[in-house]
Image (cartoon, rainbow, N blue to C red):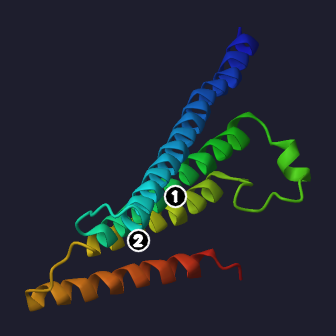
């Protein structure tokens, strides 16, 4: 009875495959949607530049869409790292990745702390991109807004600095 119970417990780790496949599907959807959004933006650029179509505040629209696409691509990357990390931690090592010349340390997860660190850094990048996307809509009609903007940039810089420092191996 004990052996059967332990076998059931050990094999229950395969439930993690639901999270792996869901993350892969989400990653594919985000990459596809962001790429389609960029194609749509490229078409709008062609219309504005060569066909004479006028779109109000087109430059702001372009910058906003590009930042959103970068944000979505980063989130898709988080899902990819999460899926690969869960698979390597709970199911098996990916042998083809270990023998590949193209594999790098970002995609090789050896522990839960490794996964957490890698995800944390990419999520920090997502937050930085989201911050700068919101900066586009800040009006500088109040001196306090300028102070808030400076404080925000300082906080983003500090977060990036400490994230980089924590990743250094001594």
Task: Tell me where residue 9 sits by quadrant.
Answer: top right
Q: Is residue 105 left or right of residue 138?
A: right
Task: Say whether disc 2 or disc 1 marks the residue closer to the N-terminus.
Answer: 1
Which quadrant, please, contains the N terminus?
Answer: top right
Which quadrant, please, contains the C terminus?
Answer: bottom right
User: Residue 119 location in percent, x, y?
Assistant: 55, 57
Q: Is residue 142 left or right of residue 94?
A: left
State yes or no: discs 2 and 1 in contact (Cβ < 8 Å). no
Residue reaching furthest front?
51
Q: Looking at this view, is 57 or 133 the one in front?
A: 57
Task: Tell me where residue 4 sits by quadrant.
Answer: top right
Q: Does 53 sit above or below residue 150? A: above
Q: Residue 74 got which mark?
A: 1
Residue reaching furthest top?
1
Q: Does 119 sit above or below residue 170? A: above
Q: Does 109 sit above or below residue 162? A: above
For label 2, the residue is 128
């Amino acid at each position: 009875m004990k052996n059967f119970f332990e076998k059931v417990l050990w094999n229950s780790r395969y439930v993690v495959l639901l999270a792996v496949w869901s993350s892969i599907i989400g990653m594919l959807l985000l990459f596809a949607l962001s790429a389609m959004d960029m194609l749509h933006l490229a078409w709008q650029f062609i219309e504005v530049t060569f066909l004479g179509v006028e779109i109000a505040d087109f430059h702001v629209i372009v910058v906003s869409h590009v930042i959103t696409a970068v944000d979505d691509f980063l989130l898709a990357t988080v899902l990819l790292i999460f899926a690969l990390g869960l698979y390597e931690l709970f199911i098996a090592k990916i042998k083809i990745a270990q023998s590949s010349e193209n594999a790098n340390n970002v995609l090789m997860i050896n522990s839960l702390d490794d996964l957490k660190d890698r995800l944390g850094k990419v999520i920090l990048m997502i937050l930085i991109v989201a911050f700068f996307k919101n900066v586009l809509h800040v009006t500088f009609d109040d001196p306090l807004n300028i102070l808030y903007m400076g404080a925000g940039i300082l906080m983003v810089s500090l977060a990036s600095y400490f994230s980089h420092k924590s990743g250094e191996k001594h």
